[in-house]
């Protein structure tokens, strides 16, 4: 079993589980399929030797963000009637629009396909390792790294402020 | 493909997967009415972009794009938090997670 075969299988599984995110009726199933998609994407990162991002993707996306989604789903306690109906005409229009987007992007990148046919990556061994990325993150990209912490504080305060229950008005 | 490199597939395969993921996410955003599934489709589109950035970063042997992906993940985490709290607030006010509920905003 060659490496190419593994990557083709991984790619098709990724697309299949991403399709199931959109197609499944129940939101909890969508969340589970999205977690599976993220794991497949992480495995493709590992295949491309981007080990740091594979681990970060697994911890942050599949771990933290998806658990947040699941928590909100369970907090809202939705039943079958709460699931909004999607109209048939709208679905057909959306599929046509999305398919057109796909075709346009594939056509626009056709030249890249030709040039990338037998392209061998240069120095693939060390671009995505923790050591390289850490050195870069704490020297060249130190200022954006610090600014992102401010972004997190703002997001945290905003989330608490938005989701806080308003004071009950006594009438 | 006779010239097999050490990352499995060629550049065009990863570009194809990435574009397919992005289009599926776009179809989901246009189709679904459930706000939570909508947010999830946006996350899917962000991941498609991440995959493309990592692919080009690997193929050119340059780590800068992976730092960008790291920051995209950071921003996506903040975005998901804020989006979900807005969703909870909207659900408390209208007892519905239909995205059409926001049509009331046009007065």
Image: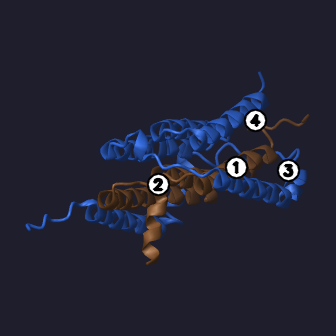
Q: Secondary structure at mark 3?
A: loop
Q: Is residue A73 left or right of residue B68?
A: left
The numbered mark at residue B8 is: 4
Query: Which color has been applied to chain B in this rendered view?
Result: brown
Chain ID of residue with mark 2: B
Distance (Cα) linking label 2 and label 3: 39 Å
Q: What residue did someone put label 3 on?
A: A116
Q: Is residue A113 left or right of residue A155?
A: right
Seen as rendered, the residue at the extreme bottom is B107
Chain ID of residue with mark 3: A
Q: Residue at x 81, y 47 (%)?
A: B12
Q: What residue did someone put label 1 on?
A: B18
In terms of sequence position, does the residue under pointer 1 or pointer 4 come before the other?
Answer: 4
Q: Is residue A169 left or right of residue A10?
A: left
Q: What residue did someone put label 2 on?
A: B35
Chain ID of residue with mark 4: B
Disc 1 with disc 3 on a shared chain: no
Q: Residue at x 53, y 39 (%)?
A: A25
């Amino acid at each position: 079993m060659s490496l190419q075969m593994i990557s083709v299988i991984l790619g098709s599984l990724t697309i299949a589980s991403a399709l199931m995110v959109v197609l499944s009726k129940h939101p909890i199933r969508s969340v589970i399929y999205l977690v599976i998609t993220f794991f497949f994407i992480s495995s493709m990162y590992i295949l491309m030797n981007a080990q740091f991002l594979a681990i970060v993707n697994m911890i942050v996306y599949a771990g933290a963000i998806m658990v947040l989604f699941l928590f909100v789903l369970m907090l809202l306690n939705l039943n079958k009637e709460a699931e909004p109906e999607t109209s048939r005409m709208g679905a057909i229009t959306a599929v046509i629009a999305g398919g057109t987007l796909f075709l346009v992007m594939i056509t626009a990148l056709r030249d890249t396909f030709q040039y990338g046919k037998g392209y061998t990556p240069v120095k693939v061994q060390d671009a995505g390792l923790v050591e390289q990325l850490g050195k870069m993150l704490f020297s060249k990209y130190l200022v954006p790294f610090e600014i992102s912490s401010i972004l997190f504080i703002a997001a945290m305060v905003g989330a608490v402020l938005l989701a806080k229950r308003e004071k009950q008005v006594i009438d | 493909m006779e010239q097999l490199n050490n990352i499995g597939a060629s550049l065009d395969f990863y570009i194809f997967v990435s574009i397919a993921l992005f289009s599926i996410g776009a179809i989901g955003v246009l189709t679904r009415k459930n706000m939570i599934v909508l947010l999830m489709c946006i996350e899917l589109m962000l991941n498609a972009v991440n995959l493309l950035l990592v692919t080009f970063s690997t193929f050119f042997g340059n780590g800068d794009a992976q730092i960008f992906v790291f920051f995209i993940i950071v921003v996506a985490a903040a975005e998901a938090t804020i989006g979900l709290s807005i969703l909870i607030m909207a659900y408390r006010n209208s007892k519905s997670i239909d995205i059409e509920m926001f049509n009331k905003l046009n007065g």
